[in-house]
Image (cartoon, rainbow, N blue to C red):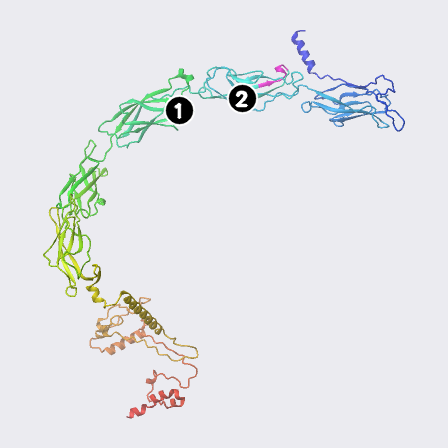
């Protein structure tokens, strides 16, 4: 038999369950039966207690787990040396699982397990055993504790806490670089045999990775693994117990390994030469194109910085690195001109910003390319010779005088002719104009510096062939001053002289203003237009002058006001002068020269009447007017026409509205009566607003010799029969006259319908209140006769 076969048989023998029948024996120790183990203690019954020596023969029970037999699994036997085999003793079992998991034959002491036991659930059970007398139920042996230990078998495979692991390792790592550690656990007893001894091996993932058998650490197995070639790997790891030997149980897990990027690839331009185009009208900052270098790395390892390192367009163009797209954006740095240069060449470099020193040997980590930029021609607007113009002109120039010329040219090679014009929004008064052909600016209205010193104009230059191409330029016109305004009094002077004034007394200081603004400043001279016997002017030579008296005393009753003409002239060329007249009132003054009253006040105010008295009189007049207005308003209130229902009488309302006569042409046209043929066709009423417009009927014109009365009667008949004609007159009929008046109606409206005279003598019978009426109407016959 070989050594290998011997080992296999030995392992099988170790792994196979071995059933044993342990037995606890109650063996008596041969001692005198009445041996006193302690001091005697008298008892009430006269007996002496003797300590008996314990008779247990103690062993530990062992039981194999996962029993698969059909009968109960035998554990062991309890036996006491006092058991005579006659059934007088009873064995009792208590503790973990007693009665359920473990049962005992109370006569024989045999212990059995009722079901299969899993050591991984519980490794040992602690129980207590006791033997008692079946008849007296007294213990014949003290209660003792024993342990049933479960022997392990290899019934659990190693398990990993995760079904799938995720790990990463940098690319280009050296062989043996640790990736991740996986650990499997085995629920079997590690202290009993090799059931829990786990060995790791790799089932999938070679030759790229390896695993340490004892620790489960996964390491790289190949050098220079390149992420750009392969990024993801799947490794399957097996964990096997029994030290990895045949017959052991195993479990597996999957590890997904990702190669992380390192900067091991330099940027590369896909082309050696790149062509771009740009319009010459592109403003500064315009992006004209982009370049991009590819990098096989990712993240910050692929970040690239672009720069222009050479070329004849370094001053005209710039490049900006776009971080999001990793592109180089080429922009215009200075204005371009197709007529000056049409092609530029740039040398652009792209370089990694994060270089790993470990991989310098793979460099250099930069690349270059040539960028050729072609400038394309566009129809450009005209260009002025200056960015702005300033013209100065005197305000006294004649209309049509040229004040300056603006110049512009077409920068294109075609050199299109230019047309000039003024933006009228900047010259609303149309003071200036411009020659469209040569750009000469001239005046079309007189200038006045005092109205506007500056004029800000805008001149437009447009190509004749393409009027949409235009350029604007600012033209500032400054109006220079000319001495064309005479000086005047600065303010209106209210001057007075006291009656008691003495010669040489100052009564007023005057000054002047001038709208002109000479270069040397204002200088005014004051003088009198003629020699005045009463007053004189003294020039202070500081643009002010003093008015002095020349005589002693003035009388306001003789002359209340003096007019003093003063001539004011300036010092500019040509000299301008004006005459201002001072009005000097003669007033009464006190001894200090303070004015008390002048001639105008003396005429209006009575002597001795103060201002307070005048105010009081004015208030009294206002109060009287208010009282009078209130009285008139109260008097105008009309009393009601009918005061109550019991006092209903005939009321005659007088409107006092008479016709306007022949001059009233609004309500009635008298010409119609005088000349019936002059009736206007379709003439509507002018005193009311008609609700519905009807077409009037045509009536034959009356002959010229028709009498006016016949004409009116004829027209009246027509309108009476015409339902569309509105009435000129309205008759209000009051049909209610009261309750049963015995006097019947007193109205005289119907008196004309009776032929004979009426008798009013019955009025005297109505009482004294009607005597007046009886006298008025009753005396009619006598008056008539007389």
In the figure, is residue 486 to the left or right of 281? left
Q: Is residue 41 above or below residue 477?
A: above
In percent of width and height, residue 79 lies at 81, 21
Depth check, front residue: 614 or 204: 614
Residue 33 is left or right of residue 761, and the answer is right
Toward the front, the furthest residue is: 591
The foreground one among 682 and 145 is 145
Which residue extends farthest left? Answer: 531
Q: Position of residue 362 (x, y in %)?
A: 40, 16
Given residues 287 and 301, the one toward you in this image is: 301
Asked if the magenta segment contains residue 240, the reply would be yes
Q: CA distance from mark 2 to mark 1?
A: 31 Å
Quarter holding residue 104: top right
- The residue to which callout 1 is attached is 303
Residue at figure coordinates x 85%, y 17% from the top left: 31
Write the start and end of the magenta stretch as one range. 238-246
Q: Are marks 2 and 1 in contact (CB under 8 Å)?
A: no
- Mark 2: secondary structure: strand
Give the numbered dot on residue 255: 2
Residue 599 is inside the magenta segment? no
| Residue 581 image position (x, y, % from top left) | 15, 57
């Amino acid at each position: 038999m070989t050594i290998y076969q011997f080992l296999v048989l030995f392992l099988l023998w170790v792994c196979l369950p071995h059933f044993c029948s342990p037995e606890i024996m109650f063996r008596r120790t041969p001692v005198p039966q009445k041996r006193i183990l302690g001091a005697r203690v008298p008892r009430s019954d006269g007996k002496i207690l003797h300590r008996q020596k314990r008779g247990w023969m103690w062993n530990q029970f062992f039981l194999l787990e996962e029993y698969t037999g059909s009968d109960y699994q035998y554990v062991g036997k309890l036996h006491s040396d006092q058991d005579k085999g006659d059934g007088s003793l009873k064995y009792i079992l208590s503790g973990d699982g007693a009665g359920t998991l473990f049962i005992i034959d109370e006569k024989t002491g045999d212990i059995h397990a009722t079901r299969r036991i899993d050591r991984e659930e519980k490794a040992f059970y602690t129980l207590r055993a006791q033997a008692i007398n079946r008849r007296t139920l007294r213990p014949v042996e003290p209660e003792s504790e024993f342990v049933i230990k479960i022997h392990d078998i290899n019934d659990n495979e190693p398990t990993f806490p995760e079904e799938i692991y995720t790990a990463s390792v940098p690319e280009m790592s050296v062989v043996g670089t640790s990736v991740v550690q996986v650990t499997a656990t085995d629920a079997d007893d590690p202290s009993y045999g090799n059931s829990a001894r786990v060995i790791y091996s790799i089932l999938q993932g070679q030759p790229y990775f390896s695993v340490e058998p004892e620790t489960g650490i996964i390491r790289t197995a190949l050098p220079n693994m390149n992420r750009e070639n392969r990024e993801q790997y799947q490794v399957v790891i097996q964990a096997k117990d029994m030290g990895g030997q045949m017959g052991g149980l195993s479990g597996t897990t999957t590890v997904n390994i990702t190669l992380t990027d390192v900067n091991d690839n330099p940027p590369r331009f896909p082309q050696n030469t790149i062509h771009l185009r740009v319009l010459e009208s592109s403003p500064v900052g315009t992006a004209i194109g982009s370049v991009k270098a590819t990098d096989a790395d990712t993240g910050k390892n692929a970040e690239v910085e672009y720069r222009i390192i050479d070329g004849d367009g370094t001053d005209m163009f710039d490049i900006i690195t776009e971080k999001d797209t990793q592109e180089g954006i080429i922009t215009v740095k200075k204005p371009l001109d197709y007529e000056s240069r049409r092609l530029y060449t740039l040398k652009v470099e792209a370089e990694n910003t994060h270089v790993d020193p470990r991989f310098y040997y793979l460099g250099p980590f930069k690349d270059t390319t040539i960028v050729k930029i072609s400038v394309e021609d566009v129809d450009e607007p005209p260009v002025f010779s200056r960015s702005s113009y300033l013209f100065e002109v005197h305000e006294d120039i004649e209309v049509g005088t040229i004040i300056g010329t603006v110049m512009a040219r077409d920068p294109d090679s075609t050199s299109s002719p230019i047309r000039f014009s003024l933006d009228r929004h900047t010259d609303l008064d149309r003071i200036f104009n411009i020659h469209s052909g040569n750009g000469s600016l001239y005046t079309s209205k007189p200038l006045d510096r005092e109205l506007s010193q500056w004029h800000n104009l805008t001149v437009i230059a447009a190509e004749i062939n393409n009027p949409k191409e235009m350029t604007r330029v600012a033209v500032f016109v400054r109006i220079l001053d000319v001495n064309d305004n005479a000086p005047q009094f600065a303010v209106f002077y209210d001057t007075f002289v006291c009656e008691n004034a003495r010669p040489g007394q100052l009564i007023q200081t005057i000054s002047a203003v001038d709208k002109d603004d000479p270069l040397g400043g204002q200088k005014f001279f004051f003088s009198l237009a003629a020699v005045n016997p009463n007053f004189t002017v003294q020039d202070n030579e500081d643009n002010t002058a003093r008015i002095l008296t020349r005589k002693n005393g003035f009388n306001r009753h003789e002359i209340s006001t003096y007019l003093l003409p003063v001539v004011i002239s300036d010092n500019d060329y040509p000299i301008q002068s004006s005459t201002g007249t001072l009005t000097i009132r003669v007033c009464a003054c006190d001894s200090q020269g303070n004015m008390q009253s002048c001639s105008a006040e003396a005429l209006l105010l009575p002597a001795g009447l103060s201002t307070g008295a005048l105010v009081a009189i004015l208030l009294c007049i206002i109060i009287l007017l208010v009282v009078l207005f209130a009285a008139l308003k109260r008097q105008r209130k009309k009393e009601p026409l009918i005061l109550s229902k019991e006092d209903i009488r005939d009321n005659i309302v007088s409107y006092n509205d008479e016709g306007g006569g022949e001059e009233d042409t609004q309500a009635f046209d008298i010409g119609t009566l005088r000349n019936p043929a002059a009736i206007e066709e379709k003439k509507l009423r002018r005193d009311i607003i008609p609700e519905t417009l009807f077409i009037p009927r045509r009536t034959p014109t009356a002959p010229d010799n028709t009498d006016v009365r016949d004409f009116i009667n004829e027209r009246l008949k027509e309108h009476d029969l015409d339902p569309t004609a509105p009435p000129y007159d309205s008759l209000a009929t009051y049909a209610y006259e009261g309750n049963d008046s015995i006097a019947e109606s007193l109205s005289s409206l119907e008196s004309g319908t009776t032929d004979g005279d009426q008798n009013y003598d019955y009025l005297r019978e109505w009482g004294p209140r009607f005597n007046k009426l009886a006298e008025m109407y009753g005396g009619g016959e006598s008056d008539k006769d007389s």
